[in-house]
Amino acid sequence: MNDSHIPHKPAIIEKIDVDAAGINFGQPSDDLTGIFLRTIVASKPSGNFLELGTSAGRATAWILEGMSKDSKLISVESDDALIAIAKKHLGHDSRLELICSLGEDVIAQLPKNHFDLIFADTWPGKYNHLEETLLLVKEGGFYIIDDMLPQPNWPEGHAEKVANLIQTLENDDRFQMVKMSWASGVIILVKKA
């Protein structure tokens, strides 16, 4: 499946992409990751969701598409220009709280065992503050990351960081885990009861 065969792609994504290109942002979430997130989020009606790394709001738009009317999404981004794009296109949605802050600072303030799904798409919550983030996931909740397959834009030494992260997650017996060769490489953990 390629991006041209994505069913029911949120129309707002084209506008987000235009604005993101206008500030030369070159690391957007892909549509395969988006459709995956939309589908998983739909499994948690009345859910509480957390996205670490809003970027310009591409994945955010997909998550919102899958959410029930009474669900809530907190999305965190430290880049003012990127979160401004997300606010412009998605800020009208009352289910969404956009926070412009360092992810580390937000993670430290959130309630433990609260989130039905966390999508960690930036360093905080993935390569740092991992344990603090995993404690935020409810029993039966999802922790999802992408960019786990080798990418051409990885800096020197990043492959080792990815391998170490995967090993850490594989050894965490609080979760069931599956590694998927989907999109940029998706890993899903579900917190055991």
Image (cartoon, helix red, strand yellow):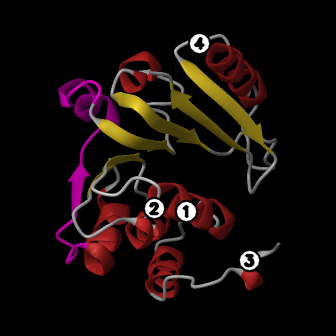
Q: Name which of mark 1 and mark 4 comes first in the sequence.
A: 1
Q: Is residue 103 magenta?
A: yes
26 relative to 134, above or below: below
Q: Label 3 is placed on what type of residue?
A: Asp
- Mark whose residue sits in front, 4 or 2: 2
Q: Label 2 is placed on what type of residue?
A: Ala
40 relative to 105, above or below: below
Spot occupied by residue 134 in the image (x, y as percentages of width and height):
43, 24
| Residue closest to the eye, 49 or 128 | 49
98 relative to 189, above or below: below
Tag 2's secondary structure?
loop
Q: Label 1 is placed on what type of residue?
A: Thr
Magenta segment range? 91-113
Q: Which residue is mark 2?
A: 42
The quarter in which the C terminus is drawn is: top left
Spot occupied by residue 14 in the image (x, y as percentages of width and height):
52, 86
Q: Which residue is mark 3?
A: 3
Q: Does 137 sit left or right of 157 as displayed? A: left
Tag on residue 39?
1
Tag on residue 172?
4
